[in-house]
Amino acid sequence: MPAESASRGDPLESMEGASSGEEETEDSPYGMAAVAAGDSAPYIGQRFLTHDAAYEFYGGFAKLCGFSIRRHRTEGKDGVGKGITRRYFVCHRAGNAPAKPFNDGAQQQRNRKSTRCGCQAYLRIGRDPGAGGPEWRVTGFSNHHNHQLLRQDEVRFLPEYRVISDLDRGRILLFAKSGISVQQMMRIMELEKCVEPGSLPFTEKDVRNLIHSLRRFDQEEQNVDLLKMCRNFKEKDPNFKYDFTRDANNRLENIAWSYASSIQSYEIFGDAVVFDTTHRLTALDMPLGIWIGMDNHGMPCFFGCTLLREENPQSFAWALQVFLNFMNRKSAQTILTDQNIYLKEAVEKELPSTKHALSIWLIAARFPSWFKAVLKEQYNDWENEFYRLYNMENTMDFDHGWSDMVDCYGLHGNKHIASLFASRNTWALPYLRGHFSAGLTASTGVSNSINDFIQRLLSAQRRLSYFIEEVALVVDCKDQAGEQQTMQQNLHNISLKTAAPVEGHAAAILTPYAFSKLQDELVVAAHYASFHLEGNAFLVRHHTKTEGGCIVTWNQKEELISCSCQMFESSGFLCRHALRVLTALNYFQIPDHYLPARWHRTLPASSKSLNGTINHSRASKSVKTLQSIVSALVSEAAKSDERMEVATREVSVLLTRIRQQPVLVNFSGESVHSSMAAVTDHCISSENVKISK
């Protein structure tokens, strides 16, 4: 009988001297796991009913030892086809695979390095029908390997042992139909099976391959026409934007789109953007890229979508170019993405003035599969230490702490740890300070809200024939939910924890979300000491410390303040150090330029226009004057409950009177009613501001 895979070389030629003689077993110097396998090791003379039973037994032994096996060749009696009389099973690394031939002019093939290294471990069984019992008998066995065997937490990743059962297969296809991401599928099945993350008998790649191979479009899905959807939506809304490319076969290759409300949102909140490319539209088997940001209430803000046929530098570059065109060529200050070498190249080329950072929550999502098996019961402690280092203030402390962490947990040589440290300037907060991120670099809270929003977007594929409209509905529902949350927040009590005029001033201008961030810093500032150095410099440090601290510089003439911690540059909120200096300088209000408009309760009127060309200077001046009056009102009313009751009652009456006035169009094209009512709502939104007792 012809040998199986004979062209790849015979690993047994050197050890077959007497093929019919019994051979001595030998333990591998690289694989003493065979000793731990105990009674499961094959032995000369061992019998099996069928050759498949022998293969299954040897496969179980191999898995315990740290390798997998494959069928090598079969032989017939006297070399003539009188039935199979001998079979060989070998280590998966037996033989040597020849390199693929290179055909000049043909499409270039990837010539991956083969895992085969001429390993000579094998099991030979012979057929002995006249023995009066099981007819297959072990006639040769060697467990001598010329390569390192795998640990039990590694061997399961060998293709031989990565098996998706019929039950799991059905669950996966059900999840795919529901629009659930592969990453979430894995987590759900881990919870269902009560196993640790990364312990399923298959990987994310196996799941993606299964979805791709078993996908069958029904009649509705076969008739999906994304271009037609976009054209129809464009007819309904002329401000809707889309673009696309076709391949050489005139098939849709890439497509991107954005809604009018998303373009308006980007004008205000497009200073920091997440471009999440970790999801796929499973129904069409296309990578899905989502541009998303954060609004002034700390909620996800949708900017646009793209579907790509392939993930390569050209596709990503096209997507970024089109997105810039949608947004009137306005680049973000910072863009956060996943670890993707192709996307990295595209960002460097298309967004040269934008800071490219890696999203910490997209990186951390892989931690369980990277480190749980390695660290075992130490994993949670390591994760806490990682986030402690992530939030450090300076790079020197980060580097020293990282080195100590590697020593403490024995992670020398770990490829993921090495890769993270090498790229630390793209994800670690100490290296990103000074680059505005609008809070998108936070490791918790923000990631959960964005992930929830993305899952709602992915659920739109349940009605694939209306996908563009379904996404629009999700975005509109999000916007309406944001408006409702805004109204609810405006009615909630805001506790002034310090009773300082600065705090009341900020509470009247900032959204509750933004105010809470600034308030946290203002409360902690009371625990810091300020020392005046030479000129305009101050040293600020915690009152319990005798060394270190941050340097704050103050320009009195222009009312400019800066701190070495660079918190304002990163988030748009003044830090505790700067607030401590302002308090020491007897400032009762925060300078306007340190209360950025993107965090205001009432957004600039000019931002609500797509072209942004209307001059609102006179209206802005009137609004600013009224805001100052409101700020003073809040500061005075917050001094006692009695004052607050009077202010609330009187402002409510005033708001009712204003709303009864006729609506006139002012010089900016905006109604006077809307301009004044927006500011008066400032009063109502602050009507429940009380001093915490």
Image (cartoon, rainbow, N blue to C red):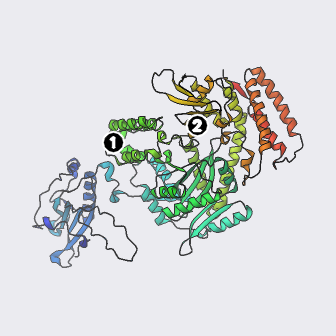
Residue at 59% x, 30% y is 554
Q: How far across and down, in percent of the image, does residue 356 sit?
A: 51, 50
Disc 1 and disc 2: Cα gap in Å? 35 Å
Please say if 532 is above or below 288: above
- Identify residue for label 1: 411
Please identify, in this view, whether the residue under mark 1 or under mark 2 is nearer the observer. 2
Query: Three-letter amino acid code at disc 2?
Result: Phe
Q: How far across and down, in percent of the image, does residue 688 sit?
A: 73, 29
| Horizontal arrangement in the rendering, residue 594 relative to residue 348 (left or right) | right
Q: Is residue 348 visible?
A: yes
Label 1: state its secondary structure: loop
Q: How far across and down, in percent of the image, does residue 377 sit?
A: 37, 38
Q: How many marks?
A: 2
Quarter of the rendering occupied by the C terminus: top right
Please say if 556 is above or below 671: above
Label 2: state its secondary structure: helix
Residue 568: mark: 2
The reply to whether the C-beta atoms of the residues labelled 1 and 2 are less than 8 Å apart is: no
Residue at 27% x, 53% y is 66
Residue at 35% x, 48% y is 415
Q: Is residue 282 visible?
A: no
Residue at 48% x, 59% y is 170
